Image: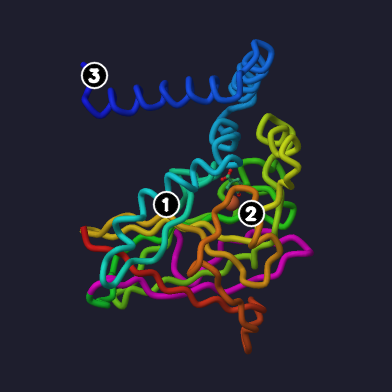
Amino acid sequence: NTSPRMRTVLSALIQHVHDFAREVNLTTDEWLAGVDMINWAGRMSNERRNEGQLLCDVIGLESLVDDITYREASKADKPPTSSAILGPFWRADAPVRENGSTITFNTPKDGQVAYMHGQVTCAETGKPLANASVDVWQASTNGLYEQQDPDQIDCNLRGKFITDAEGRYSFYCLRPTPYPIPFDGPAGKLLKLMDRHEYRPAHIHLIVEAEGYGSLTTQIFDKDSKYLEDDSVFAVKDGLTVEFKPREGDAKAQWDLEYDVKLARK
Ligand code: DHB
Ligand code: FE
């Protein structure tokens, strides 16, 4: 049975699509070109490539939905860490790893290693949250996530870390670098038609979860990266830029990134 919510969403969607066609006097050829794009996206999609999501992202839809979702939480007296879009490269089956271990295996020659660490706390009370899960993933210096790249080992540059009694997590990773989103499909074609580039600023993805708290999906951005002002998928927000500082006395990492996360109580 159709729920009232489903009726609201579907009737508004159809109304706005009709209004759009009327507004631009959409021709048969133009409509068919749109149909071709959707079919092309379907053909390109597989478990390694979510072209439908990529299409939504280049027109700012995922970013808008994220803004709508975060709006309530942001009104709190002491708001939680800002959310950001999930993007197409998260994997549900990333392994749990030990704090202090690494997510970068066979680090590429042009890769710089960073030690990322921080504390997960309750946004309202500041209380440290033990046993929170910090799920992270990032692309390699060639711009590819491991599932896109046969030369990376399975689950390279991703992993889940469980916070200790003080709410702390830590791991070694790559200092991220800017890279293009997959550009050889309909999302790339759309970008070309709009005279836009395909690059994203350097970022690390996070999903942070703790019992009794709202799940946080976000991304952090290197404050020195290119493309912060013109991210091809509109994910950058104030408060999500971070500073990598030189790390002294650690042969394993040349950069240090301290990043604390605040979660909202459910
Ligand atoms: C998108 C997001 C990413 O984080 C990424 O690495 C590539 C694409 C996206 O939103 O489409
Ligand atoms: Fe990404």
Q: Say which residue label 1 marks.
A: 67
The kind of residue tagged 1 is Asp
Q: Is residue 230 above or below residue 245?
A: above
Q: Quarter of the image holding residue 141?
A: bottom right
Helix, strand or loop under label 2: loop
38 on left or right of 260: right
Labelled disc at residue 2: 3
Q: Is residue 114 magenta?
A: yes
Q: Say which residue label 2 marks.
A: 231
Q: Residue at x 42, y 44 (%)?
A: 65
* Residue 73: % across, % down: 30, 59
| Cβ at disc 3 under 8 Å from ligand 1 | no
Helix, strand or loop under label 1: helix
Residues at marks 3 and 1 touching, judged by CB atoms closer than 8 Å: no
Q: Earlier in the sequence, mark 3 or mark 1?
A: 3
20 on left or right of 2: right
Q: Quadrant of the N terminus?
A: top left
* Residue 160: % across, % down: 44, 57
Q: Nearer the viewer, residue 13 or 138?
A: 13
Give, as a single range, the part of the protein colored magenta. 97-124
The kind of residue tagged 2 is Asp
Mark 2 and mark 3: span between their CA atoms? 38 Å
Q: Residue at x 67, y 17 (%)?
A: 30
Mark 3 nearby-residue class (10 Å; few <14, some 14–19, many ≥20): few
64 on left or right of 119: right
Q: Earlier in the sequence, mark 2 or mark 3?
A: 3
